[in-house]
Image: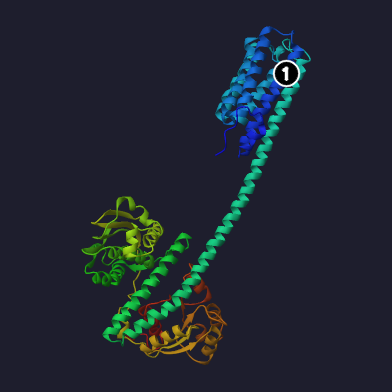
Amino acid sequence: MDKPIPFLNFSLKKVLARQSDNLNRARIKIVYTTLLLSLLKIVIVMPLIYGQVGGHQLYRIGFIFILYVILTKYLLYKPNSINIISHAIILSGVGGIWSNLIVLGQSLNLVTIQFVFMVTFVGYYIINSRYAIIYSFFAIGPVMYYLMVNNRSAWHLNNTSTELPSPGFEVIVFLNFLTIVLIHYLFYRAFRDNVHEKEELNKQLQATVAETKALAESRSVFLSTMSHELRTPLNAVIGMTSLIKDTASEEQIENLDILEFSAVSLLTLVNDILDFNKSENDKIELENIPVNLPVLLHKVASGLQQKAAEKGFELVLEVDNSIKDEWIITDPTRLTQIIYNLAGNAIKFTEQGRVCVKVQEEDRCDGQLSVRFSVSDTGIGIAPDRQGIIFDPFMQASVDTTRHYGGTGLGLAIVKRLLKLFNSNIKLESQPGKGSVFTFNINFERFKGDVTPVSSRKVNDNNLQGLHVLIAEDNPINALLLVKLLTKWQVTAVVANNGQLAVDKLMTDDFDVILMDLHMPVMDGYQATKTVRAIDDEFRANLPIIALTASVSHNINDKIKAAGMNDYLSKPFQAAALFQKLETISRGKPGNAMVG
């Protein structure tokens, strides 16, 4: 904290050094200049007019001199009191105008008019504009009164005043003009400096914003790259685990379940970090596709049912009968993520009792359907003073929660941000030791078009015999996993470890579909796809291409479509998802349209 200015300070420089704002420094300079020039006028004029004016004039000049000396010293001691000093100066000016024209009955002269201008200018430059308007009217008032009560022949400015003889009159006029000029100069210079300062600050701000954007972009690129590097081996771990379990013994299956659980947990952590990063940078965009709401909810509940069973209680799903066959337009991935995070949290923090996911119709009108979702549990609950912060990133209800249950504290933060995309907010009711209830409402657009059912047959019960697949994949482990998986479905597969080899193999053999990795040496998936689409052979040029990528950049779908690919799967992918896409292609082959 700055030390207070000493009482005996006579330096304006010390006062100005403590002011950080250009306009505030200008106010102090204007007041200081006005006071000094006024004192100078009195010092110069007093010897010239002494003995030539009445006593009342000398008393008035003496009073102003003493007042301005006091105000000058007070300004150098207490510059923060500049408002009080400014009001005192302006009031003295207004008082001088009134006393000249009304009290002393002088004629309207140049000095009086100068005082009117100075009161008006100084008022607007150093005090609040509301007070400046009031003071301006008070300064102009006696002038207008004088003009109204005197005849037109008196409407001129006397060269000299009978009350203020030469050369005092001329000195006052000159110093008044000098005061007006200096006041304008000081204010303009402060205004100019302030504009330059703001321009410099804007440049610094723009540079800082650009640097921040660059850092955010580099972070996003880093996370996307790390995601690719993490997802690629995870794809192999999860896929191979699933394949081995088909022929493993009961003891081996138990060990493989542990391995698969750990891999899936790591994948969930990676997904949470990436989703949080994308939501933080506003890079999540909702899809709008037809979804059977009850079917979607049952899939989410089925995926979490085993977790609840392992802890010895039940996950209950209650869906209104009024929406049991309802099709809506929404983003199924993000809606699933919201419910999965809330229900998964409820299961994690509940030791006994139950977890219930309840879905109710709230309203239905004009093609819109309002649905209320609630996830309740009988778990540990949340203290009232912690209920607000659990939706903040990396925050949990307590340190004990992190130690006993683990987690990053990102799940609820992601839920809150995703719900904003749905124009919704989440509400929480909770009591420690009794459980919690999370609720939110979403307005959906009802789907009114034709619905094409998707095959619900299990992957293990079907094969894709006769399908010939070209795999473009540079990672040998992932390529081996795909070959084993496709062989299981009786699909013949050929592997190319870069995009150029994939194009070469396509020219020498007939394939039904290409599974294209995006990041490969020599020629990546995008370039390879564009090369395929440019082939003269119409059949090969229009071959279905499905991208298999560990990348999760926010515009990956746009980039894939722009390259000419038909579809994509994110690694690690579910075998059922790949089977479903290949089955659609198999059914489209000549002679297979009605098979299955």
Which residue lies at the image location 54% right of the left edge and 86% below the top edge?
A: 503
Q: Quadrant of the N terminus?
A: top right
Relative height, residue 569 to residue 493 (above, below) = above
What residue occupies the far bottom of the structure in this picture? 508
Choose between 376 and 472: the one closer to the eye. 376
Q: Position of residue 551 (x, y in %)?
A: 48, 73
Q: Position of residue 343 (x, y in %)?
A: 30, 64
Query: How did the renderer colour the structure?
Result: rainbow
Does residue 555 appear anywhere in the picture? no
Can you identify the residue that label 1 sits on? 43
Which residue lies at the image location 57% right of the left edge and 55% below the top edge?
A: 209
Relative height, residue 365 to residue 253 (above, below) = above
Q: Position of residue 290 (x, y in %)?
A: 36, 68
Tell me how many marks there are: 1
Q: Position of residue 185 (x, y in %)?
A: 70, 33
* Amino acid type assigned to the residue bearing label 1 in the image: Val
Relative height, residue 211 to residue 139 (above, below) = below
Relative height, residue 496 to residue 3 (above, below) = below
Q: Quadrant of the C terminus?
A: bottom left
Bin the neighbour count of mark 1 within 10 Å (Cα to Cα): few under 14, some 14-19, many 20 and up.
few
Choose between 69 and 505: the one closer to the eye. 69
